[in-house]
Amino acid sequence: MKKLFLIGACLLALASSPALAQAGGPPVVVVQLYYSGLGTGHVAVTRGEGKTEDIEYKVTNIKQHVASETYQRVFTQLYQEGYALKSTFSPGDGSVVTLIFDKK
């Protein structure tokens, strides 16, 4: 009887481990798009407290498409990780746009 109980407990532990492994990453990611001046833009991707990645890009008269290519690259990565756009907002002056992504 003890062996049967032990085998059942081991099978239960094995069955629950993959679910925990798949849960990696936060359920919500916050992305802020803003310009710091003189053609320099930023995409700040925050995955939790102290886990912010700042992606800087330069926009010139010749390369005005750099911003959209940077946004496309970041959004594609988030969609590949299983995130979907949930909400957007701006503080009112339009200098910062905040996007909220969550996992499906």
Image (cartoon, rainbow, N blue to C red):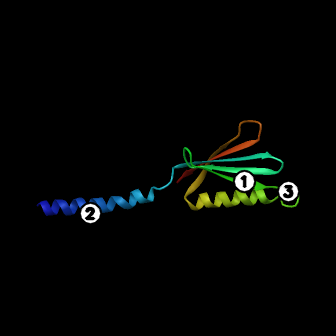
Query: Left or right: 18 with respect to 79?
Result: left
The residue lying furthest to the left in this view is 1
**The disc label shown at residue 27, or none:** none
Amino acid tagged 2: Leu
Q: Is residue 36 above or below residue 93?
A: below
Q: Where is residue 91? Give x, y as percent.
A: 71, 36
Which label sits on residue 56?
A: 1
C-alpha span from label 2 to label 3 = 60 Å
Q: Position of residue 82 (x, y in %)?
A: 55, 58
Circle 3 residue = 60
Q: CA distance from mark 2 to mark 1?
A: 48 Å
Name the spot of residue 31 as percent of width and height, x first.
64, 48
Q: Could you tell me how far apart the alpha carbons at marks 3 and 1 are, in whole angstroms? A: 13 Å
User: Residue type at mark 3?
Assistant: Thr
For the residue labelled by badge 3, is the local secondary structure a helix, a strand or a loop? loop
Please tell me which residue is depicted at 35% across the width and 59% down the height of the picture. Answer: 17
In what quadrant of the picture does the N terminus appear?
bottom left
- Name the residue tied to disc 2: 11
Q: Residues within 10 Å of mark 2 (few under 14, many from 20)?
A: few
Q: Which residue is nearer to you in this view: 75 or 84?
A: 75
- Comparing 22 with 43, the one in front is 43
Residue at image x 64%, y 61%? 76
**Quarter location, residue 96:** top right
At 76% across and 41% down in the image, what residue appears?
95
Q: Quadrant of residue 5?
A: bottom left
Q: Tell which of 33 and 42 is nearer to you.
A: 42
- The tally of labels here is 3
Q: Residues within 10 Å of mark 3 (few under 14, many from 20)?
A: few
Label 3–label 1 contact, CB within 8 A: no
Among numbered discs 2 and 1, the one appearing first in the sequence: 2
- Horizontal and vertical percent position of residue 46: 60, 48
Q: Residues within 10 Å of mark 1 (few under 14, many from 20)?
A: some
